Amino acid sequence: MRSLRARARPPSLEDFVGRRGGWEDGGPGTLLELGLGGCLFRPPPRPQRLTCTEARTGATVAPRFDYSGVGNSDGILEECTVGKWRKDVLSVIDELADGPQILVGSSLGGWLMLHAAIARPEKVVALIGVGTSADGLVTQFNQLPVEAKKEVEMKGQWVMPSKYSEEGVYHIQYSFIKEAERHCLLHSPIPVTCPVRLLHGMKDDIVPWHTSMQVADLVVSTDVDVILRKGSDHRMKEKADIQLIVYTIDDLIDKLATSA
């Protein structure tokens, strides 16, 4: 791999959209080529089937993987938790990623990237969140009427409507929600000190854009930008959205390469 100090060409829009994966929410599950040392790693938004892809020779690869219990990975989905998926992310960073890391997390991946930055501050040098869903499922559950929450607790399962599911709903175990509460971050300062860029569509009907504002306010880093797209939704998959993500990545690479 090349060093961060050896600045190569910036990623182009074609690099970004050229390898589409099956993101759960329909967004652009892509493998980026950065052409310099250190991987750019994008945790998926929610469990779905993704496979690794080879990039061109000399390019830097962004690892992609199936969480435990999802897609081609071993495990039983009903036995998985946010904590277990957090371990999956850290395992990829520890065992597959070499050099400094820029993490790009979409939706639930944005929540997990924050945990990764807290746990591996020596390797994670920057974060880019796209529709960051920090504490997302827990917040959604807590917003339910009291009677609805009692029903979920009694039945042990939350049937959550979703336009992104073929069935029209997700079946979420109550135990999953309770375990996820242990990983919530929006109740106190978030000990992330690296540069953070948060992109969010103001027409996001899954994760309110105010969540990115909360994250920006709570991370201790002073190098934080929030970019709101008035006409964009949760997926941020339109050409202009993808272009913005690429520009944001490129700006961070320039910043890090200059300071290296």
Image: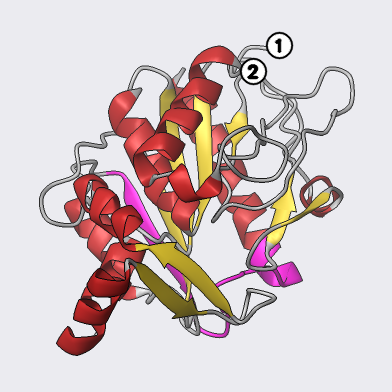
Q: Quick one: label 2 or label 1, which is nearer the N terminus?
A: 1
Q: Nearer the viewer, residue 96 or 35?
A: 96
The amino acid type, in three-letter code, at marker 2 is Gly
Q: Residue at x 19, y 37 (%)?
A: 191
In this rendering, position of residue 120 left or right of residue 61: left
Q: Is residue 216 left or right of residue 159?
A: left
- Kindly report the distance in space between the C-alpha atoms of the residues bearing marks 2 and 1: 5 Å
Q: Secondary structure at mark 1?
A: loop
Asked whether disc 2 touches disc 1, contact meaning CB atoms under 8 Å apart, the reply is: yes
Looking at the image, which residue sits at the far front?
155
In percent of the image, x 71 and y 32: which residue is there?
34
Q: Within 10 angstroms of label 2, few (less than 14), some, or many (20 or more) residues?
A: many
- Residue 122's place in the image compared with 220, above or below, is above
Which image quadrant is residue 208 in? bottom left
- Res. 225 visible in picture: yes
> Does the segment drawn in magenta span residue 232?
yes
Residue at 68%, 64% (x, y): give it: 27
The magenta segment is 223-242
Determine which residue is flagged by label 2.
37
Locate residue 203, reporting x and y percent.
50, 85
* Residue 212 in sight: no
Where residue 180 appears, as percent x and y from the top left, is 29, 51
Task: Look at label 1 and name its amino acid.
Answer: Met
Local crowd size for mark 1, using a 10 Å CA cut-off: few (<14), some (14–19), many (≥20): some
Residue drawn at x 28%, y 66% is 213
